[in-house]
Image (cartoon, rainbow, N blue to C red):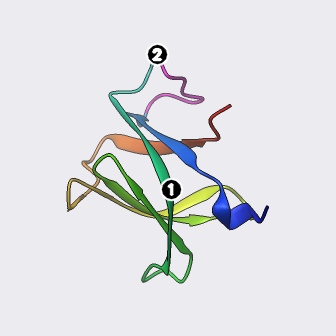
Amino acid sequence: MSSESQTFEILLVPEHVVEGSRQDAVRSAVVAPTGANGASGYPRYAGEGMVADIDPATRTVEALLVDGSELDYGLKPILYEPA
């Protein structure tokens, strides 16, 4: 199984939260690979209203749209791998 075939959970937490958990999240979504690369050049993942370009090597969200819009100020994404 390649790292690009995994699903991830993206948690949106307030910026002041250092290490967020599901309890800190104002919204979350499980995203799966679309098979395409985003404008950032990283693999694109989508699901539950979120579209993200994720670097699978570093597990970093490189770009994110929530319901078709950029992320609101004051929020940051945290990437989790569902168990």
Q: CA distance from mark 1 to mark 2?
A: 22 Å
Q: Amino acid at mark 1?
A: Ala
Is 16 above or below relative to 10? above
Q: Does 2 sit left or right of 56 as displayed?
A: right
Q: Earlier in the sequence, mark 1 or mark 2?
A: 2
Which stretch did the figure color magenta?
16-23
Residue pictured at 57% horizontal, 30% vertical:
18
Comparing 15 with 21, the one in front is 21
Residue 22 magenta: yes
Is 28 above or below relative to 39? above
Is 40 above or below relative to 20? below
Comparing 54 with 19, the one in front is 54
Do the CB atoms of the residues marked 1 and 2 lie less than 8 Å apart?
A: no
Residue 57 magenta: no
Q: Amino acid at mark 2?
A: Gln
Name the mark on residue 62. Answer: none
Q: Which residue is mark 1?
A: 32
The kind of secondary structure the magenta stretch mainly shows is: loop
Q: Secondary structure at mark 1?
A: strand
Q: Quadrant of the C terminus?
A: top right
Residue pictured at 65% horizontal, 41% vertical:
81
Residue pictured at 24% horizontal, 48% vertical:
72
Q: Which residue is mark 2?
A: 23
Corner quadrant of residue 29 = top left
